[in-house]
């Protein structure tokens, strides 16, 4: 008596989805990482001849201690609440 043949298909889902996953990661994560890196640098886009210098957390301190920051934050929160 012969055993029934079991249909063994290869699972190709990984190979099919891999290009899409790589594309989505490249389009979303690469700009995110570059933005994080740039946030720690002092760089004048209008004057690239001045060079790029590591600035640490100074950019964040400048933003959080700015008098306009809380006005902008309040306006942003109001817009978010209105849009919801």
Image: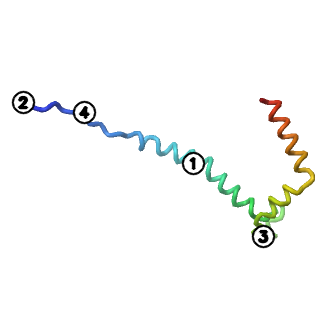
- Is tag 3's residue or tag 2's residue first in the polypeptide sequence? 2
The CA distance from mark 2 to mark 1 is 53 Å
In the image: residue 22, left or right of residue 68: left
Mark 3, residue position: 51
In the image: residue 57, left or right of residue 11: right
The CA distance from mark 1 to mark 4 is 35 Å
Closer mark to the observer between disc 3 and disc 2: 2
| Element on which disc 2 rests | loop
Mark 4, residue position: 7
Query: On the image, which quarter does residue 39 sit in?
Result: bottom right
Closer mark to the observer between disc 3 and disc 4: 4
| Element on which disc 4 rests | loop
In the image: residue 38, left or right of residue 79: left
Closer mark to the observer between disc 2 and disc 1: 2
**Residue 77 screen position, x and y as percent:** 83, 39
Mark 2, residue position: 1
* Contact flag, marks 4 and 2 (Cβ < 8 Å): no
Query: On the image, which quarter does residue 7 sit in?
Result: top left
Mark 1, residue position: 25
At horizontal 57% and vertical 44% (from top left) the residue drawn is 24
- Is tag 3's residue or tag 4's residue first in the polypeptide sequence? 4
Q: Residues within 10 Å of mark 2 (few under 14, many from 20)?
A: few
The CA distance from mark 3 to mark 2 is 80 Å
Q: Nearer the viewer, residue 47 or 23?
A: 23
Above or below, 8 against 38 in this view is above
């Amino acid at each position: 008596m012969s055993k029934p043949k079991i249909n063994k298909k290869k699972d190709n889902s990984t190979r099919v989805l891999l290009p899409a996953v790589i594309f989505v990661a490249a389009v979303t994560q690469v700009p995110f990482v570059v933005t994080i890196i740039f946030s720690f640098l002092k760089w004048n886009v209008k004057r690239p001849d001045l060079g790029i210098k590591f600035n640490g957390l100074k950019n964040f301190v400048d933003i959080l201690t700015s008098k306009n920051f809380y006005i902008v934050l309040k306006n942003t929160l109001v817009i978010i609440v209105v849009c919801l």
